[in-house]
């Protein structure tokens, strides 16, 4: 694959992932990492590239939620540090184990994320109640698997908290605000552990594709039925993960 074609592929991946994230409020990392693994990008490179590209978008998202008052400071305090610690551990493990060994496990994880997204799309509205137990543990788990799988902070943490009855607006805002720090923590580990000159095309492509798609995301959110879109995205992630798992085990 030549340089120009490679960049175009990654631009398309970034574009599609950002459209999905704009419509669902989650799944940028899961979607883009599933695509990248599917086209042969090594697990550590895929996760690192996704999170390097996400540093900018999560900063903008977190600032926007702060300005709009969508934050629950008590929730952020319980998520931020545990989430960052989990992310650092996950990134360290990912960069110190062979990609071929990790790929089947990451594919299984992404397969589970796809099932969670489908289940969320099928779920009916729930009664709101604030639940505050085990949030720090959830942060560690979410940060760890976000680093290992190239995404999952939103699907794991947001879905769990909202499913337990926490206010959706404050939960989404707080989780997105915390995500910048989780993403930044992972990126620092990746910068010191990987040779990024080999992956500049992936990072640049994701950034360009995401930047092009960002202005369209709001329109997608307005026009497309979210539950149906979640089902389609979840099924797509499941299919990509099964393909990656099959190729990894067959190889």
Image (cartoon, rainbow, N blue to C red):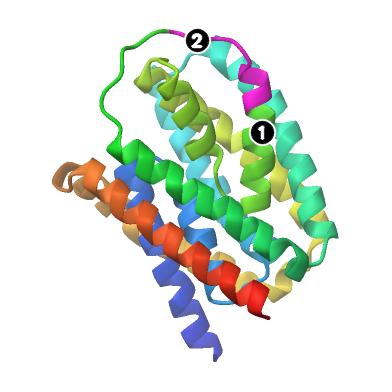
Secondary structure category for the residue under label 2: loop
Quadrant for the N terminus in the image: bottom right
Residue 154 shown left or right of residue 224 in the figure: right
- Neighbor class of circle 1 (other Cα within 10 Å; few <14, some 14-19, many 20+) is many
- Neighbor class of circle 2 (other Cα within 10 Å; few <14, some 14-19, many 20+) is some
Residue 68 in view here: no
Quadrant for the C terminus in the image: bottom right
Proximity of marks 2 and 1: CB atoms separated by less than 8 Å: no
Residue under the image location 39 percent in, 70 percent down: 12
Residue under the image location 45 percent in, 50 percent down: 114
The percent coordinates of residue 202 (x first, y second) are 57, 70
Location of residue 25 (image quadrant):
top left
Reading the image, the residue beneath label 1 is 141
Say which of 216 and 107 sits in front.
107
Q: Which residues are magenta?
A: 130-138
Q: Which mark is residue 91?
A: none
Q: Distance of mark 2 from mark 1, alpha carbons? A: 17 Å
Q: Is residue 163 magenta?
A: no
The percent coordinates of residue 117 (x first, y second) are 40, 43
Reading the image, the residue beneath label 2 is 131
Residue under the image location 75 percent in, 55 percent down: 190
Residue under the image location 59 percent in, 60 percent down: 107
Say which of 97 and 79 sits in front.
97
Q: Is residue 136 magenta?
A: yes
The percent coordinates of residue 228 (x first, y second) are 22, 47
Instruction: Judge whether 101 appears above or below 119 on screen.
Output: below
Farthest residue to the left: give it: 223
Residue 86 shown left or right of residue 92 in the figure: left
Say which of 188 and 225 sits in front.
225
């Amino acid at each position: 694959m030549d340089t120009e074609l490679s960049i175009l592929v990654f631009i398309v991946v970034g574009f599609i992932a950002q459209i999905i994230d704009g419509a669902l409020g989650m799944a940028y990392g899961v979607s883009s990492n599933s695509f990248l693994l599917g086209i042969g990008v090594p697990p550590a490179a895929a996760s690192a590239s996704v999170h390097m590209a996400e540093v900018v978008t999560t900063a903008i998202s977190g600032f926007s939620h702060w300005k709009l008052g969508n934050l629950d400071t008590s929730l952020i305090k319980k998520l931020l540090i545990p989430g960052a610690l989990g992310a650092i551990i996950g990134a360290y493990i990912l960069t110190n184990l062979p990609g071929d060994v990790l790929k089947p496990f990451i594919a299984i994880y992404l397969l589970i994320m796809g099932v969670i997204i489908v289940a969320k799309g099928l779920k009916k509205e729930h009664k709101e109640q604030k639940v505050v137990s085990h949030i720090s543990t959830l942060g560690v788990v979410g940060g760890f698997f976000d680093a290992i799988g190239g995404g999952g902070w939103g699907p794991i943490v947001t879905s769990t908290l909202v499913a337990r009855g926490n206010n959706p607006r404050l939960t989404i805002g707080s989780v997105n605000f915390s995500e910048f720090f989780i993403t930044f923590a992972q990126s620092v580990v990746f910068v010191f552990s990987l040779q990024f000159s080999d992956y500049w095309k992936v990072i640049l492509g994701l950034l360009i594709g995401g930047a092009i798609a960002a202005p369209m995301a709001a329109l997608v959110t307005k026009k497309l039925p979210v539950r149906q879109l979640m089902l389609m995205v979840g099924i797509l992630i499941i299919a990509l993960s099964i393909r990656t798992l099959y190729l990894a085990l067959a190889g």
